[in-house]
Image (tube, helix red, strand yellow):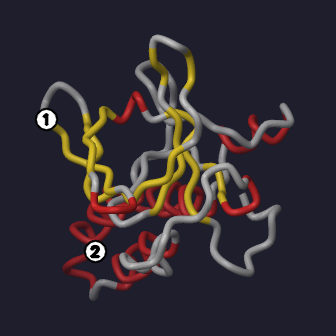
Amino acid sequence: AKAQALAALAQAAAGTGAAADSAASHGSMEVAPAVPGTPALPAVEAVAAELKAQDASAGGGAAAAASAVASSDHEDSDPQEPFPDPSNTELWRPIAREPAAGEVIRFRTAGKSGLSGFRAARCESVVDFGRGQRCLLGFAGGASEELPLEQLLQVSVKRVVGSPKADV
């Protein structure tokens, strides 16, 4: 179980796996988040927490590795830094998992008039209210909004400066 969790954690952090492979083979790197009935990788933080709990008596080696991987997508995110342009695809890396707290994300939502344009925000927290998970989003200028995770479509995270484009 620990090996499977580490593999899922590594896939989630690297943005690989079945969802990313499927998107790449279809020429689209825009990957919608998991919705009911769609398989998805577990949230990186959830896997890291599970590994930490399992490995607490063994010296914490796997938990430390999981923690390092869990923070790799958003460790370069400065809360004071302006968000990248959401319309510039070169600045974003699509993900096939839930956004994690602290990550700067780009996303769309569906409304009565169709899909919205891309918006950028910081995922402040993801909370399960029993009716489903909701993401608290912080926008430039201090505005915030809370949305159900299933409403966040075509989610991408801020690409780390200097990372190759093929690193999806």
Q: How many marks do you count on the picture? A: 2
- Dot 2 surroundings within 10 Å: few (below 14), some, or many (20 or more)? some
Determine the residue positioned at 43% across, 46% down. 98
Q: Is residue 142 above or below residue 37?
A: below
What type is the residue that disc 1 sits on? Phe
Say if residue 147 shows up in the picture: yes
Q: Position of residue 6 (x, y in %)?
A: 48, 63
Provide the secondary structure element on which disc 1 rests: loop
Q: Circle 1 sits on which residue?
A: 129
Q: Residue furthest front?
A: 141
Name the residue that disc number 2 marks.
55
Quadrant position of residue 75: bottom left
Residue at x-position 56% and y-position 16%: 114
Q: Are marks 1 and 2 in contact (CB under 8 Å)?
A: no
Which corner quadrant holds the N terminus?
Answer: bottom left
Rendered location of residue 112, percent (x, y): 46, 11
- For the question of whether residue 1 can be seen, the reply is no
Query: What is the crowding at mark 1: few (fewer than 14 residues within 10 Å), some, or many (at least 20)?
Result: few
